Image (cartoon, rainbow, N blue to C red):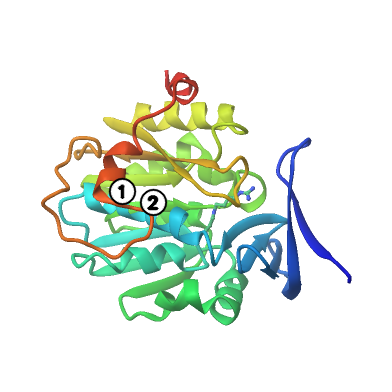
């Protein structure tokens, strides 16, 4: 029997391999190499430039955690902007919140949206919701040029190499700060505390120098490098660790719970050390 495998080289010295049934799609867009694979353990998997973005089996951890922590922290999230996230997984979680009136997705690569719509409807279905506006544009340019303000801005980016590099910079966060309302919240995916220590340190330093409240939280995502993943919040008013969420509406989720909202901010010592 022929055995097919996909391998992501997570670092120079560590690789992640999983057995696949077949390749559903590959192409080279103007920005990156896009692939959809059918894996045995994780179901369909979206791969950009050789790195795992999301899979049917574990997408819920990342998409719930990048969304529900900031949206439950805010008293009344109405207008949301997602930068990146062309697969639509974050959008599907945002729309579970009854206060949300509009969501804008700013994705640089139109092909990621189209491929996700075609091959990953389980994740991308909410992209067709009437509350969602899709803008195919560079997030950095968008943030500089818009006149609207948002309650929450979510940076659902790829790794800080290639098209997403500029999405991890001081200037970008500071421009985002200007496009948030007075009670606004920024949330960014910030990689692995095992493999991206310098990045986490820098991002946290930058976000804490721009926002009065900065916090980092963790979740377990099996298909991402090291499995332990971080998210960083910058908030103008609401502190995600003290807000009383127990009184709030309930939503359907598989990873996020109100208890996890509080516990995800409890950090191991080696992670805490990155934040000083
Ligand atoms: N964005 C974060 C993916 C980072 C994974 N890194 C890696 N495999 N080296 C996910 C986008 C999902 N909407």
* Dot 2 crowding, Cα within 10 Å, few <14, some 14–19, many 20+: many
Q: Which mark is residue 65?
A: 2
Q: Nearer the viewer, residue 11 or 179?
A: 11
Q: CA distance from mark 2 to mark 1?
A: 6 Å
Question: Residue 54, percent across and down?
Answer: 56, 60
Q: Who's the residue at 56% across and 38% down the image?
A: 192
Identify the image quadrant of residue 36.
bottom right
Please state if 77 lies on the left or on the right of 270 as rendered.
left
Q: Are marks 2 and 1 in contact (CB under 8 Å)?
A: yes
Quick one: which residue is furthest to the left in this view? 247
For the N terminus, the image quarter is: bottom right
In the rendered image, which residue does mark 1 sit on? Answer: 69
Quick one: which residue is furthest to the front in this view? 1
Question: Residue 61, percent across and down?
Answer: 45, 54
Identify the image quadrant of residue 250.
bottom left
Q: Who's the residue at 29% across and 59% down the image?
A: 148
Say what secondary structure mark 2 lies in.
helix
Instruction: Please tell me whether residue 137 is drawn above or below residue 162 in the rendered image.
Output: below
Please state if 53 lies on the left or on the right of 173 as rendered.
right
Question: Residue 151, percent across and down?
Answer: 25, 54
Q: Nearer the viewer, residue 166 or 114?
A: 114
Please state if 208 lies on the left or on the right of 115 as rendered.
left
Quick one: which residue is furthest to the right in this view? 1
Instruction: Please tell me whether residue 77 is drawn above or below residue 216 in the rendered image.
Output: below
Instruction: Please tell me whether residue 100 is drawn above or below residue 69 in the rendered image.
Output: below
Q: Nearer the viewer, residue 208 or 25?
A: 25
Q: Which mark is residue 137?
A: none
């Amino acid at each position: 029997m022929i055995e097919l495998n996909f391998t992501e080289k997570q670092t120079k010295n560590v690789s992640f391999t999983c057995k696949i049934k077949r390749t559903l799609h590959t192409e080279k867009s103007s920005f990156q190499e896009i692939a959809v694979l059918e894996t045995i353990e994780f179901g369909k998997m979206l791969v950009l430039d050789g790195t795992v973005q999301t899979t049917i089996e574990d997408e819920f951890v990342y998409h719930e955690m990048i969304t529900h922590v900031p949206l439950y922290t805010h008293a009344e999230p109405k207008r949301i902007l997602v930068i990146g996230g062309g697969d639509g997984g974050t959008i599907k979680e945002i729309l579970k919140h009854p206060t949300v009136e509009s969501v804008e997705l700013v994705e640089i690569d139109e092909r990621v949206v189209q491929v996700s719509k075609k091959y990953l409807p389980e994740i991308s279905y909410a992209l067709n919701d009437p509350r969602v506006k899709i803008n195919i544009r560079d997030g950095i340019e968008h943030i500089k040029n818009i006149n609207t303000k948002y309650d929450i801005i979510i940076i659902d980016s790829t790794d800080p190499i290639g098209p997403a590099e500029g999405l991890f910079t001081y200037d970008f966060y500071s421009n985002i700060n200007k496009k948030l309302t007075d009670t606004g919240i920024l949330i960014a995916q910030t990689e692995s505390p095992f493999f991206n220590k310098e990045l986490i340190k820098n991002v946290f330093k930058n976000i804490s120098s721009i926002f009065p409240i900065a916090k980092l939280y963790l979740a377990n995502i099996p298909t991402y490098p090291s499995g332990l993943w971080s998210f960083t919040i910058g908030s103008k008013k609401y502190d995600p660790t003290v807000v009383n969420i127990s009184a709030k509406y309930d939503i359907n989720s598989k990873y996020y719970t109100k208890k996890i909202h509080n516990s995800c901010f409890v950090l191991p010592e080696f992670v805490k050390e990155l934040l000083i």
